[in-house]
Image (tube, rainbow, N blue to C red):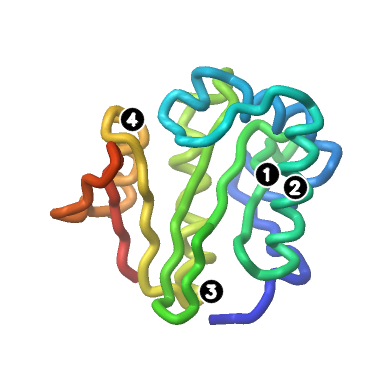
Amino acid sequence: MLPGFSPFPELSTERLRLRQLTMGDEKEIFLLRSDSEVNRFLDRPRAETIEDARQFIQTIRSGVQEDKWVYWAICLRSDPALIGSIGLWNISREHSKAEIGYELLPTWQGKGLMNEVLPPVLDFGFSRMKLRTIDAVLDPANTRSLKLLEIHGFKRLASSEVAGTVTYSLEA
């Protein structure tokens, strides 16, 4: 696996730019992490204050610097405002494996943006990071996300239901 995420690996698609998260994203991160619709299928504490968002951004930026994960802010090519995020987490260099996670602000959901963003992120994971497997762990009631993963070749693991989640996996 290639070492490090420095310089930060920006990615782009026809409509979108994936860039490094900055402290200037605090308002949008707060909206993502406090929104009940966004958090409906996620097992995480909701952001209660803008300070919670700042702490999250600092944690993410530190983890990127330490090569613990890579996390992109999703924005339109024509507007740098964050509309969502996507990242590769729980990276196991020993097993050449990582977990993918993503979210969009509600006004941007259902517009095909994740279908556009997933291919370059998967390519980055497999080609640049030399991963062999990318997993996604999600709530089985999150049918839109399940469908997205299946469209992009992820397969449900046979014995994946643990603590109310299912695991989907994609091999290089």
**Residue situated in front as seen by the camera: 102 or 12:** 102
Q: Amino acid at mark 3?
A: Met
Q: Amino acid at mark 2?
A: Leu
Q: Is residue 33 above or below residue 60?
A: above
Identify the residue at horizontal 53%, vertical 74% (top origin).
Answer: 129
| Alpha carbon distance from label 3 to label 2 | 20 Å
Amino acid type for the residue under numbered disc 4? Asn
Mark 3 and mark 2 lie on one chain; the one further toward the N terminus is 2
Q: Is residue 74 above or below residue 32?
A: below
Q: Where in the figure is residue 92, as x and y percent of width and height? A: 47, 72
Residue flagged by tag 1: what amino acid is it? Ala
Category of crowding for the residue at label 2, using alpha-carbon neighbours closer than 10 angstroms: few (below 14), some (14–19), many (at least 20): many
SS category of the residue bearing label 2: loop
Disc marking residue 142: 4
* Total marks placed: 4
- Which residue is pictured at 45% across the width and 64% down the height? 98
State yes or no: discs 3 and 2 in contact (Cβ < 8 Å).
Answer: no
Location of residue 115 in the rendering, given as x and y in whole percent from the top left corner: 44, 41
Residue furthest to the left in view is 158
Q: Earlier in the sequence, mark 1 or mark 4?
A: 1
Image location (x, y in percent) of residue 66: 71, 69
**Lower sequence index among marks 1 and 2:** 2
CA gap, disc 2 to disc 4? 26 Å
The first of marks 4 and 3 along the sequence is 3
- Counting residues from the start of the chain, the first of labels 2 and 4 encountered is 2
Disc sitting over residue 129 in the figure: 3
Q: Position of residue 139 (x, y in %)?
A: 33, 35
Rendered image: mark on residue 21: 2
- Contact between labelled residues 2 and 1, with CB atoms less than 8 Å apart: yes
